[in-house]
Amino acid sequence: LAEVEGWNIKDGFYYIISMLCGLPTPLTEVDPDTDEGKLVDVIVALWALALAGTIIGVVGGLSVINRLVDAAESFGQRFKRAAKKAVTGSDEEAPAAAGEDGEEKPVSLALNILTFLVFIFIVIPIVIILVAVIFGFILAEVEGW
């Protein structure tokens, strides 16, 4: 892209890295102006999407990720039991109630919703904040801030 647009290599490298990482604020002030540069830009964007999908697929298949998912599910089950005990005062499993179609459905729909909301609004934001703080400290150390 740098060759097509007449940029120096450094600007081309920073532009491509910005594109691949999906940064909202590019690392450089250059943008493609020519039709050839815009075509290369689109090809890089499509390649970045394919690369991201591949990375997600590979990472999702790792045994470490499977263990993390199992741990999160275990935490969710423990949370449901604790919430049920707090609400009903009982550790026993909730009996299933028959629905309109005759199939059994769990009585603990409210606990499922509560568990989902706790994960969405508490657990996930905490993980995101921790990761952002860790990478922020690493970046600050590298940049000498």
Image: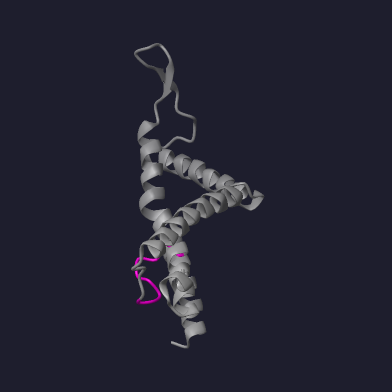
Dominant secondary structure of the residues highlighted in magenta in the image? loop
How many marks the image carries: the answer is: 0
Up-down relation of residue 51 to residue 13 (above or below): above
Residue 16 percent across, percent down from the top left:
46, 68
Q: Is residue 49 visible?
A: yes
> How was the colour assigned to the protein in this rendering?
one colour
Q: Residue furthest bottom?
A: 144
Residue 36 percent across, percent down from the top left:
41, 62
Q: Residue furthest right?
A: 63
| Quadrant showing the C terminus | bottom left
The answer to which of 42 and 142 lies nearer the viewer is 42
Up-down relation of residue 33 to residue 79 (above or below): below
Up-down relation of residue 30 to residue 53 (above or below): below
Q: Is residue 24 magenta?
A: yes
The answer to which of 116 and 25 lies nearer the viewer is 25
The answer to which of 84 and 101 lies nearer the viewer is 101
Find residue 103 and report its image quarter. top left
Q: Is residue 126 visible?
A: no
What's the residue at 45%, 69% (across, down)?
4
What's the residue at 59%, 52% (across, down)?
59
Q: The magenta stretch spans which residues?
A: 21-29
Residue 94 percent across, percent down from the top left:
45, 28
Residue 72 percent across, percent down from the top left:
53, 48
Q: Residue furthest top?
A: 102
